[in-house]
Image (cartoon, helix red, strand yellow):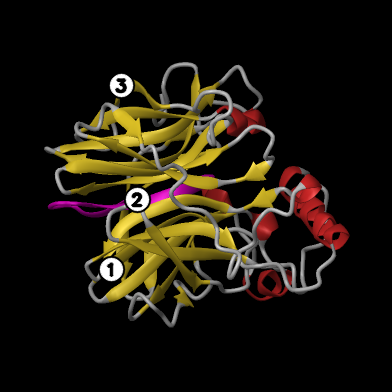
C-alpha cells in the first residue's frame, strides 16, 4: 500500500521527532467512514514509529479532544514537539464546540513520547489582537491561530504559528463575512470564482512567539506577512548553511489575485528564505513553490537524515492505489536545499 495511514483512518498533517535512532511520527487522524472534509471536526493525534521513514509501526492514539466543556473539546489539530530538559513538549491546536473556527494552542508534556499529559494552564497561546485577527463572535467567529512549529532560534524557545494579520480598522462585519464566504467557496467548489484582492485579501501570515519555560509566552508581530496568501499552514523553520527558511503549505484558492497573476497559484508546499531569522524574506525558486498542485502533496516537512542529507515527507491527497481522497503520509523523497533553491526529487 502506498504510504502510511492507520487501518481505516485518514492521516494528514503530521510532525516528527527523532529519538534513540527512531523516527516518531505524530499525525492527525479520523475514521475513513467520514466524508473527507468532515475529518477536520473529528481529528485526534495518532503515533507511529520507523527507522527509515518508509515502514511505519502504528502505536495508536496519543492525544484526543478534551471532555465536554473544555477548551479543546471539539478536536485536536496540528502541532509539533521539542525535546527540552529531558522531556518532550508538545504544542498543539485545539478547538472548542460552539466556537466555529476559533483556534487556540495548548501544551502537553511527555517523558517517553507515548503518554502525554495536557498542561493545567491550557490554552497557553492565543492570538494577540494588536497584530492578528481575533474572533468577532456570531458568524465571524473565525480566528486563525494554529499549527505551531516549536524550535529554538538563537537560543530562544520559539513558536511559529499560522495566523492572519488584523482586520483593517472600520471594516464592517458584513464585508468581512462576505470575504470569508467567498474564500470558503474558492476552497470547496470547482466553480471559477474570482480571486480575492484588496485589504481583506492575502492576510495570511506566520506569527512568532517566544518563551522561557514553554508555558508562558510573549507574542510578537508577524515574522512573515507577504500579502500573497489567505493562510500559510503548517509552518517549518530551518537554518541551513547560513540561509534561513520558512516553509508552509497553502491552497490554490487562497492566493491573492495580483500574486496569482504574476506567479501562478498552487496547492502544496511553498517556502521563503532570508539571510537571518528576521528577514528580509524572499520566495525560494523565484515564485516560492516547492511542491505544487500536481504533486498532490501537503504539509511537507523537511527532515535531515544523518549520512543521507535532506528528505521531504508529505501527506498526499491522491495516490496510485485509491480513488478519491487518499489521506496517507507518502514515502520520503530526497531534497536539494542550497541558498534560495529548494528542489524535491
**Marks 2 and 1 in Cβ contact (< 8 Å):** no
Say whether residue 14 is magenta: no
Q: Secondary structure at mark 3?
A: strand
* Image mark for residue 59: 3
Label 2 Cα crowd, 10 Å radius (few <14 / some 14-19 / many 20+)? some
Q: Secondary structure at mark 1?
A: strand
> How far apart, in angstroms, are the residues tagged by discs 2 and 3?
28 Å
Nearer to the camera, 156 or 245 = 156
Residue highlighted by disc 1: 239
What residue appears at the point 41 percent right and 40 percent down from the top-left corner? Answer: 14
Region rendered in magenta? 296-311
Query: For the residues carrying marks 2 and 3, which lies nearer the camera in this image?
Result: 2
Q: Compared with residue 75, is residue 302 higher up or lower down, i.e. above or below?
A: below
* Image mark for residue 215: 2
Q: Secondary structure at mark 2?
A: loop
Q: Compared with residue 123, is residue 192 higher up or lower down, i.e. above or below?
A: below
The answer to which of marks 3 and 1 sits earlier in the sequence is 3
* Image mark for residue 2: none
**Marks 2 and 3 in Cβ contact (< 8 Å):** no
The answer to which of marks 2 and 3 sits earlier in the sequence is 3
Residue 108, given in percent of the width and then of the height, sits at 35, 38
> How far apart, in angstroms, are the residues tagged by discs 2 and 1?
25 Å
Residue 251, given in percent of the width and then of the height, sits at 62, 53
**Which secondary structure class fits the magenta region best?**
strand
Amino acid at each position: 500500500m502506498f504510504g502510511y495511514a492507520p487501518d481505516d483512518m485518514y492521516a494528514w498533517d503530521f510532525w516528527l521527532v527523532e529519538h534513540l535512532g527512531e523516527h516518531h511520527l505524530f499525525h492527525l487522524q479520523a475514521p475513513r467512514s467520514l466524508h473527507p472534509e468532515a475529518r477536520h471536526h473529528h481529528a485526534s493525534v495518532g503515533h507511529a514509529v520507523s527507522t527509515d521513514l518508509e515502514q511505519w509501526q502504528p502505536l495508536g492514539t496519543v492525544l484526543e479532544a478534551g471532555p465536554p466543556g473544555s477548551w479543546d473539546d471539539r478536536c485536536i489539530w496540528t502541532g509539533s514537539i521539542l525535546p527540552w530538559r529531558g522531556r518532550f513538549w508538545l504544542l498543539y491546536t485545539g478547538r472548542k464546540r460552539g466556537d466555529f473556527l476559533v483556534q487556540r494552542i495548548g501544551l502537553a508534556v511527555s517523558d517517553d513520547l507515548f503518554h502525554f499529559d495536557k498542561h493545567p494552564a491550557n490554552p497557553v497561546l492565543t492570538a494577540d489582537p494588536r497584530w492578528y485577527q481575533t474572533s468577532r463572535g456570531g458568524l465571524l467567529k473565525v480566528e486563525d491561530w494554529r499549527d505551531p512549529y516549536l524550535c529554538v532560534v538563537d537560543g530562544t524557545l520559539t513558536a511559529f504559528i499560522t495566523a492572519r494579520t488584523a482586520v483593517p480598522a472600520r471594516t464592517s462585519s458584513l464585508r468581512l463575512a462576505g470575504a470569508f464566504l467567498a474564500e470558503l467557496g474558492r476552497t470547496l467548489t470547482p466553480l471559477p470564482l474570482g480571486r480575492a484582492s484588496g485589504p481583506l485579501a492575502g492576510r495570511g501570515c506566520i506569527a512568532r512567539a517566544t518563551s522561557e519555560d514553554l508555558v508562558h509566552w510573549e507574542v510578537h508581530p508577524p515574522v512573515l506577512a507577504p500579502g500573497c496568501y489567505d493562510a500559510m499552514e503548517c509552518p517549518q523553520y530551518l537554518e541551513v548553511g547560513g540561509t534561513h527558511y520558512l516553509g508552509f503549505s497553502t491552497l490554490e484558492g487562497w492566493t491573492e489575485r495580483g500574486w496569482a497573476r504574476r506567479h501562478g497559484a498552487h496547492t502544496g508546499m511553498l517556502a521563503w528564505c532570508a539571510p537571518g531569522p528576521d528577514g528580509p524574506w524572499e520566495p525560494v525558486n523565484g515564485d516560492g513553490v516547492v511542491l505544487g498542485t500536481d504533486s498532490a502533496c501537503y504539509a511537507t516537512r523537511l527532515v535531515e537524515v544523518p549520512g543521507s542529507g535532506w528528505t521531504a515527507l508529505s501527506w498526499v491527497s491522491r495516490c496510485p492505489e485509491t480513488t478519491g481522497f487518499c489521506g496517507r503520509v507518502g514515502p520520503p523523497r530526497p531534497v536539494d536545499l542550497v541558498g534560495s533553491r529548494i528542489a524535491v526529487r
